Amino acid sequence: MAQAAAVAKPPAPPRRRRASATPRRLPYLLIAPAALLMLGFIAYPVISVFYYSLQEYNPTKPWRNGYAGFDNFVRIFTDDPQFWSTLTFSAKWVFVEVGLQLLFGLALALIVNQTFAGRALGRALVFSPWAVSGVLTSAIWVLLYNSQTGITRYLADVGIGSYGTSWLSDTSTVFPAAIVADLWRGVPFFAILILADLQSVSKDLYEAAEVDGAGRIKQFWHITLPHLKDAIILSTLLRAVWEFNNVDLLYTLTGGGPAGETTTLPLYIANTSVESHDFGYASALTTVAFVILLFCSIVYLRLSKFGGTDK
């Protein structure tokens, strides 16, 4: 007994406090209000569009409102030739605009990436149109294309064309005029992204290529262009989506005219909803446009192998 009492009982190990879950959850709790607001502002309109696409909804004709099922979609593909014409023009608009913006943006990025006197000012001038809002851009080009005070008047003064000519009201000139107006603002977007990626190209690669006897053209094709691949893919995809949904410029410049020559699918949707008040059919058109954009984006990313490495 005495020996047992003499043996000291080992002290109990200290209890570990349960780690509080609050510090781990704190970042999520802090961003939860903003995330819920964003989800509400994004999810609610999307769900509403899908809902109204299955409805016959026109506030000016409430007696016709009700569930329509897939009638709106059947009407789009079987009884609406304007849908196909606007979709065709939208594809043409996106292809021409994005292609030219990429070409000129790449050229400008390569130029301002060089070292020369006044490079900072040159970069500021190149990038400045991107800082101008779409509405202001439209207003500027409306004034430039004005038949009384714009470009055509000064061209007529030097004997080119005639007075009172309006490029925006002529079916043969309205498309190139709209293209030039949108190029002015779209080219800096590509120039900014491509220039940012050019800054990360190692100069050692160019020096090694020069030692091997590669000229500027070979350096561009085998060093610069492969390095810019992902930047070009991403920028063209983003710009294609934006150009497809472009409404403000064409609406301000031409209103979709003359004779519907410059009516894109989003502009047709806007006219259907705002002017005709046919919100159910406009929602169905929007749903179809969303599916088209989603499908084309997935196919483009898969075919271009975005983020992959070339073997």
Image (cartoon, helix red, strand yellow):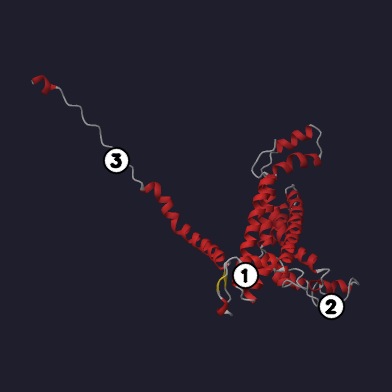
The mark tally for this picture is 3
Looking at the rendered structure, the kind of residue marked 1 is Tyr
Pinpoint residue 128: horizontal percent, then vertical percent: 69, 60
**Crowdedness near tag 3: few (<14), some (14–19) or many (≥20) residues, C-alpha within 10 Å:** few
Confirm whether residue 46 shows in the render.
Answer: yes
Q: Which callout, 2 or 1, points at the residue further toward the start of the chain?
A: 2
Sequence-earlier tag: 2 or 3 = 3
Residue 180, percent from left and from top = 77, 63
Tell me the number on the disc at residue 164.
2
The one of 272 and 171 positioned closer to us in this rendering: 272
Discs 3/1, front: 1
Mark identifier at residue 281: 1
Relative depth, front residue between 271 and 167: 271
Instruction: Specify the quadrant of the image occupied by residue 289.
Output: bottom right
Residue at image coords 84%, 73%: 154
How far apart in space, not on screen, are marks 3 and 1 (Cα)?
61 Å
Visible in this render: residue 195? no
Report the residue at 79% width, 69% height from top. Answer: 174
Question: How many residues crowd around disc 2 within 10 Å: few (fewer than 14), some, or many (20 or more)?
Answer: some
Query: Which residue is situated farthest in the top direction here?
Result: 3
- For badge 2, the amino acid type reads Gly
Residue 122: where, in percent of width, then height?
A: 73, 55
Closer to the camera in the image, 94 or 105: 94
- Percent across and percent down for residue 78 are 69, 66
